[in-house]
Image: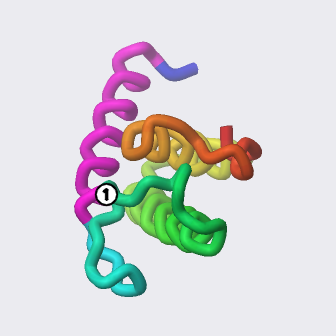
Amino acid sequence: MRSKKDMYEERKHIWKRSRVLSGEKLSFLEGTRLGDIDIAVESNATVRKVRRILEKRISQEYWRNRRTEDGNGDRQSVRRRMTRSMRYIYGCVPEGFRYIS
């Protein structure tokens, strides 16, 4: 069982990583920052690309800094980080991606 301090530290880490990710520039949108895109207005293809970029960056960072063997908890941790990052960057998780929540 994780302590409240561990959960707080993880949340703080996700917040910092989300800020870094929101500044990443997208080449397929002429250098627009990831955080400047309005996912409620953009086309579905753009939203899917953004989701894939976020999933890739978050899972790469998670597996690079993994400390313990967690079994199936690793997949759940990556999904939780993905959901929280989407909420921190865009304020919500897009309607089509509720499976992440």
Quarter holding residue 55: bottom right
Kindly tell me whether residue 71 is visible in this rendering. no
State the residue in front, 14 or 36.
36
Quarter of the image with the N terminus in it: top right
* Image coords of residue 78 (percent x, y): 57, 50
In this rendering, is residue 5 above or below 78?
A: above
Compared across the picture, whether 50 is left or right of 24 comes to right
- The residue carrying mark 1 is 36
Compared across the picture, whether 33 is left or right of 54 comes to left
Residue 5 belongs to the span the image colors magenta: yes
Which type of secondary structure does the marked residue at label 1 adopt? Answer: helix
User: For the residue carrying disc 1, how many other residues have a C-alpha within 10 Å: few (<14), some (14-19), or many (20+)?
Assistant: few
Quarter holding residue 35: bottom left
> How many tags in the picture?
1
**Amino acid at the residue labelled 1:** Asp
Q: Main secondary structure of the magenta part?
A: helix
Task: Look at 39% across and 59% down and name the residue there.
Answer: 37
Task: Look at 55% across and 42% down and name the residue there.
Answer: 83
Quarter of the image with the C terminus in it: top right
* Image coords of residue 94 (percent x, y): 62, 47
Compared across the picture, whether 69 is left or right of 26 comes to right
Q: Residue furthest top?
A: 4
* Image coords of residue 53 (percent x, y): 49, 70
Residue 85 belongs to the span the image colors magenta: no
Task: Look at 35% across and 18% down and name the residue there.
Answer: 5
In this rendering, is residue 24 above or below 85?
A: below
Q: Residue furthest front?
A: 41
* Image coords of residue 20 (percent x, y): 24, 56
Task: Look at 44% across and 54% down and name the residue there.
Answer: 38
> Which span of residues is magenta-colored?
3-23
Colour mapping: rainbow
